[in-house]
Image (cartoon, helix red, strand yellow):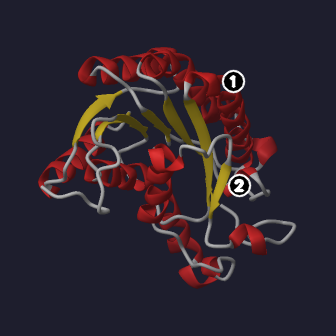
Amino acid sequence: MGDRGGSGRFSGKAVIVTGGASGIGEATIHRIVGESGSVLLVDIDEAGAGRVAADVAAAGLAGEVAVCVADVSTIEGVDAMVADAADRWGRLDVVVNNAVTTEIGPVLGISDEGWQRTFDVSVTAVWRSAKAAVPVMAANGGGAFVNLSTNAALAAVPGLGAYGAAKAGVIQITRQIAVECAAQGIRANSITPGVIMSPGIALLVQHHGRERIEADLPGGLGQPAQLAAVVAFLGSDDASYVNGENVQVDGGWFAKRSPGGLTFGV
């Protein structure tokens, strides 16, 4: 079995990827397992997680994947995923916080429940993952967090008020973890993806048309594998001196942005 990507940067390392049943999470799992990593796929979608695990196994990649069905919006879910990885592999080296949910609509029209769940899944889960994982990482000499934010945290996108606000929090909690945990050998970085062809974006493309959406995107629609490559870099020892950064992976959209953000809403 050969490595995908030409290296075994994750050989001997245990990695958690939340929201791994589709999109960026799924692509990240393929990338890291292809680079000899042991990955715990965490998702509430048991069927989707099983499909991804089966696809990885069928691909004959160098590493391995296991599934943990857990809700990262809860303390119990986060604690369970960290305990699962530690029990299974005796260590934990990288946590990729990618799980997401949101209620779409005008910011003042979002329900209290939708607002709270968006924050619980997107940013509170990152904080809880650090509380649970840092002691395990530190016991093995350190580790890394890669936390997925969004360009909607940097510029207003109509209909994504809760999502943008929560993901802005992801950038800041990432910086806090980076500064406060550096002495334990732990790094933390965030990524703000642009418009990536995930299941949700596929619906936008269907509704608005690809031409209209790509008119705002100098690099066109991004692909999950392009994000996965950056996630893998930040989680690997190749990024050993990268800490507390937010990396924009958007094909140049933010550099081109108008004051009102994207011209299409959701």
On screen, residue 109 above or below 123: below
**What is the three-letter code of the residue carrying label 2?**
Ala
Residue ID at (77%, 54%): 154
Badge 2: residue crowd in 10 Å (few <14, some 14–19, many ≥20) = many
Residue 21 position by quadrant:
top left
Spatial CA span between label 2 and label 1: 26 Å
Q: Is residue 184 visible?
A: yes
Compared across the picture, whether 230 is left or right of 12 comes to: right
Q: Residue at x 49, y 19 (%)?
A: 138
Mark 2 lies on a secondary structure that is helix
- Find residue 131 and report its horizontal and vertical position in percent: 56, 17
Q: Which residue is mark 2?
A: 152
Q: Position of residue 265 (x, y in %)?
A: 70, 64
Mark 2 or mark 1: whose residue is earlier in sequence: 2
The foreground one among 201 and 122 is 122
Q: Nearer the viewer, residue 165 or 254?
A: 254
Q: What is the quadrant of the C terminus in the image?
A: bottom right
Picture coordinates of residue 247 (x, y %)? 64, 55
Please give the name of the residue rendered at 63% of the width and 23% of the height, measured from the top-left corner.
183
Q: Which amino acid does the dot numbered 1 rest on?
A: Glu
Q: Are circles 2 and 1 on residues that touch, CB within 8 Å?
A: no
Quadrant in the rendering for residue 6: bottom left
Determine the residue positioned at 76% across, 43% down.
109
> Does any portion of residue 199 appear in the rendered image?
no
Q: From the viewer's side, name the closer residue of 157 and 132.
A: 132
Disc 1 packing (10 Å; few <14; some 14–19; many ≥20): few
200 w.r.t. 119: above or below: below
The dot on residue 201 is none
Report which residue position mark 1 lands on: 180
Whether 96 is drawn above or below 256: the answer is above
The image quadrant of residue 20 is top left
